Image (cartoon, coloured by chain):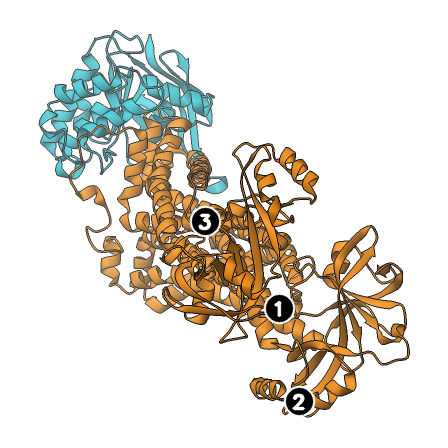
Amino acid sequence: MTRALFDAPRRGRTILAAIGIFAASLVVGTAATVGFGLATGFDRAARQADLPDVIARFDREPRDTVDERVSALPNLESRSYRFELEDVPLRAGGEHTHKGILHVVLGGRRGYAITAGRDVRGPHEAVVERGLAREWGLAPGDRLVAWRDYELRVVGVAVEPDNVAFPLTVTPRAYVSERDWGDEPLPANLALLWLADPERADITLAQARASSFGIGGLSFVTRAGIEALLGEAAGIVISLLVAFSLVALVAAGTMLAASAHAETQRRLPALGVQRALGFTPARLAGRQAAETALVAAPAAALGLGAGALAVAGPSAALLAQLNEQPPGAALLPVHAACLLAITALVTAAATWPAWRAARRPPAEILRGGELGRAGARRWSMRPAPPAHDGLLATGARFAFAARGRFAASVATIAVCAAVVTLMLALATLLDRLRDDPGAVGKRYQLTVRLDPFEVDAVKAIPGVADAAERYQTDVADSFRLGEPLRMIAYRGDHTTFEAPPLADGRRLRGDGEVEVGVGLADALGLRPGATLAVQPEGGDEVRFRVSGVVRALEHDGRIAYVRPRRLLDAQPGVGSTISVRLEPGADRALVERELEALGAPPQPVGGATTRNAAFLGVLATVLRGVGLAVGLVCLYALIQALAMTARDRRGAVALLRACGGDAGTVATVLAGAALAVAVPAAVAGVVLEWLVLGPLVARSAAGFASLPLAPSAGQVAVVLGGLAVLAAAATAVVARRALREPVIAGLREE
Amino acid sequence: MAVVSARGLVRTFGQGRSARRVLDGADLDVEAGEIVAVLGRSGSGKSTLLHVLGGLDRPDAGTVELGGERVTGAAERRLSALRRRHVGFVFQFFHLLPELSGEANVLLAARVRGADPGAVARGRALVDRLGLREVAESLPHELSGGEQQRFAIARALVNDPSVLLADEPTGNLDVRAGAEVLVLLRELAADTRPTSSGGTGGRAVVLVTHEASAAGIADRVLRLEGGRLVAA
């Protein structure tokens, strides 16, 4: 059977089918590797780190006082405490930060996993978080200095998946021993709680709140909450990857089914003879299934392996950014399941036409009828338009002739093109979110921390188009204190500087009105006309009437734009900066120097997630990788469609050659067939992305913001150009094969 | 001077004990305006001879020249050009493309790269000349066998070749249509208008058939026996 598959007449088709399965499996392999890693990464890391079910933060208190109350909580299995120091200057090996966090471990279960070295045991020892170790190149044995002279020897590297890793978070963390802090017992401001039944955490939390009288600044984070937070970003990636791998698989299945249909059509006489000799349809279909599985299984295994290898690096980097662990051997059963699924799907797709053909009466098969409905397969039965066809048009006619295959090819390549377009749009969006303030509705380029009375001086700088005070503070909703939100205030029209698109209602017009982000509106059930009551830190409650809802990406859409008067009345100490809008073509460096001369260095304004640049970069790389794999599926589909057309019309190709047509003539005809598929597929793909995929993904990724996922002219050009290149490549491959065949072989078949 | 000249053609199919030498030192010369009919049993190598003469197949030994140009040993690109300039093929089964009208099939040969610039006009003129104008827009399945073969002959003549190679041109036609096609071939051979390759003495026609009646129009009748051409 193996020999039959690789005998000269079938070798090319077998190899082509194997390449298709390989390409589809490659996409599935990448999706499975990244998707499974992200889907299970948190659980794995949390289990390995023994992450507590609840983390409570509070103002520093004597440990005994806290423990007295904590130990009385219901559903508690165990507890431990830490003393957390924030904004600690850290430096090592030429790197430094003022945002370091030191956790003094006060005994008990530690809640982090050591991934290198060991835990702290004695004085002047530190364990650093993996993100810090990676970014600063730290390893056990290195030196780390906190403040000016607190020298520590790094003895281990740890992962604590209660937050994303440094530098995704700007606060790198190190763990130190209690022994460095003298004999007096240190206070605690962090309690780690492990529950007997994590499902009933609400009971424990309710009791904790009830018994927290006298303990200030209390806040809780649950393990489920952390998982949801980290999973939000990962979920989008997973759903995209799963969708793309399904697309690739369906594309490969469709093309293989079309190929199997053509192959069965060619083998119809042999099938007829076999049926006449007494072979049952089941036996003939079984043979086809066995032959297909023999090709599909190794090709799929190779594809899955290659896909897994291709994204192993980016996937591990992504997980590391999220403070999660790679799946390791746990991925093997997933890939085994994928292998089985792909082999089964491909085998079913290839066996179905053989089964259908073999079930027909032997006499009918021997008469050589088409597999499909009589008269339904070819358009040639229709009157032809006036005969002015060139070679390209003749090739296009060849492609149109097999309607079912033409439709399947166009649909497959259109979906692939749509996915690639979406990938490009997503990657561009990620880059813009990282770098371009305009992507989140910000219309100013610089911000400077100067006194508000300097606004006029800033406006007077050449190259500055406008400047205004910008107040920003994080407050809580009065009714639901667990819902934090960010308030931003400008004295005049804020849309001059920040203009997220309006989703509902109108812009604010007075001191008592507010525009809220969709994220906040969803969380609090706000609509235009509703009241937003906020509780500034240490101030009185302030109320605003909602005038409009805006699609703001910043702070997950939990944002509110107001005029500053009421806010300042309630919280006079709200921090402000000056937002600076530059004129088009302004000398930015000059403006920056002038601003610095006024007394403070200006800061460039980034996108919504400037601090997450590395994370977004990794995501964009992964998405572009998947796009490339889908592009390979596209190439395969084109080659497959074209090869089948060439195979069907080898007589016509031979005739052209007999008439004196050279390689260029044959290539032109085949290019016509390729373009007949590629052009409508490209147009349909772009339209599909524009009208369906883009809006769908934008909505599912961030319902609180407007994500520009419509393809740009450049992206459309790249996709169209890419398809043209793929069509040319497919034409070259198939023309080369067609020209290798002797002319008389094609003439005999016709 | 012979338009077609073949010397010592040898062509073997298969290998080892199953090898079969269908041409074994065949020689042939055909003058311009001459029709040579080649008779022989089925499987005697008649079509192979035609394929070798027209550069569709390569002999194991021997030489072929068309219009003084060497066919044997030429690269594929050169062979394409030789076929385009010198050879017109007529097949038993017509080989018309089913999705193209009769005239489009004729003009297809005029659209191959390197075709004579006047080929399209010539193709249209041929459709008129062969009395096919009324059915020019019909699809092949709407045409009679005789009409299909006449379109196929028009296609073979589009590039104004000096040699017409006809492989059982009447084999798929009824007696009347077959007779019409044979008359047409006779007329084409006698046509002394200058060809695009410069010939002025009419076309050389090699007609392969197993029907003795078809040989009636030939100037010379040869028989392929034991791989050699002998006078019938």
Q: Which residue is drawn at 66% across and 89% down?
A: A76
Disc 1 chain ID: A
* Cα gap from disc 2 to disc 1, whole angstroms: 26 Å
Res A550 → quadrant? bottom left
Q: Position of residue A463 (x, y in %)?
A: 57, 33
Q: Position of residue A522 (x, y in %)?
A: 43, 68
Amino acid at circle 3: Thr
Mark toward the viewer: 3 or 2: 3
Rendered colour, chain A: orange
- Of the numbered discs 3 and 1, the one sitting upstream in the chain is 1
Q: Which of A258 and A267 is in front in this view?
A: A258
The answer to which of marks 2 and 1 sits earlier in the sequence is 1
The residue tagged with tag 3: helix, strand or loop? Answer: helix
Q: Mark 2 lies on which chain?
A: A
Q: Is A745 on the left or on the right of A46, as rendered?
A: left
Looking at the image, which is closer to me, A220 or A48? A220
> Contact, CB < 8 Å: mark 2 with mark 1?
no
Q: Answer above or below: position of A620 versus A145.
A: above
Q: Nearer the viewer, residue B175 or B26?
A: B175
Whether labels 3 and 2 share one chain:
yes
Q: Reply above or below: A139 against A396.
A: below
Residue identifier under label 3: A495
User: Which chain is painted in cyan?
Assistant: B
**In terms of secondary structure, where does tag 2 sit?**
strand
Q: Quadrant of residue A382?
A: top left
Q: Residue under circle 2?
A: A76
